[in-house]
Amino acid sequence: YLHNIDFRFHFMGALEVLSSQAVNLFVASSLECQRHLGNNGGEDFFTMQCLDAMGAATMADYSLLDDKYTHDQGWNLFDVNSCVNPAIVAFHPYKAVNSWMGCYKVAVGSQSPKDFVGCNYRWHGDACSLEGTLQHAPGEAKPTDGIVMNRAR
């Protein structure tokens, strides 16, 4: 299985890559792992511990996942700026609908981070650009998706 990030235990749930052999090993061993390892932690930590305990081999590629929890201070949960990187296959966390959709639109190229309201000016629920300075137009109805320029159809 793939160690996917140079952070904490190197296996974050936003991108879990397992070979078919690792999946078969995990499925066959998960009940035994649950008895011996318990349920302390998320599914990613449990999966990693179980696979390690069963002797599964690992490889590492830290270039595929962008996880904001690994960013330096000053990151914003709703910022879409990192979504512009075409080499990244998964972005985390984007748990609100508008921030997920904003990241998706930037990743596929239908919007640019500069089209979004600045994070200092965002309303609750808006996706935003940490580097942005755009603000909502006076009288604009709340909430929005955060896109204030060049809205793609």
Image (cartoon, grey):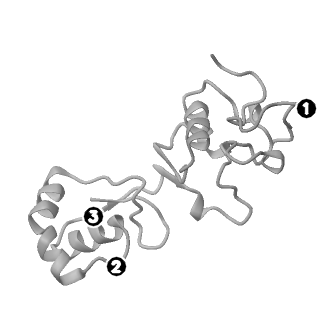
Are there few (<14), some (14-19), or many (20+) residues within 10 Å of tag 2? Answer: few
Give whichever of discs 3 and 2 has the lower sequence position.
2
Report the amino acid beneath label 3.
Answer: Thr
Based on the displayed image, in which of its 4 quarters is residue 51 positioned? Answer: bottom left
Label 3 belongs to which residue?
58
Left or right: where 81 falls relative to 123:
left
Label 1 belongs to which residue?
138
**Quarter holding the N terminus?**
bottom left
Give whichever of discs 3 and 1 has the lower sequence position.
3
Q: Which mark is residue 40?
A: 2
Report the amino acid beneath label 1.
Answer: Pro
**In the rendered image of this protein, does residue 10 appear above or below residue 143?**
below
**In the rendered image of this protein, does residue 102 appear above or below residue 44?**
above
**In the rendered image of this protein, does residue 35 appear above or below residue 19?**
below
Task: Give the foreground label among 3 and 2.
Answer: 2
Task: Give the foreground label among 2 and 1.
Answer: 1
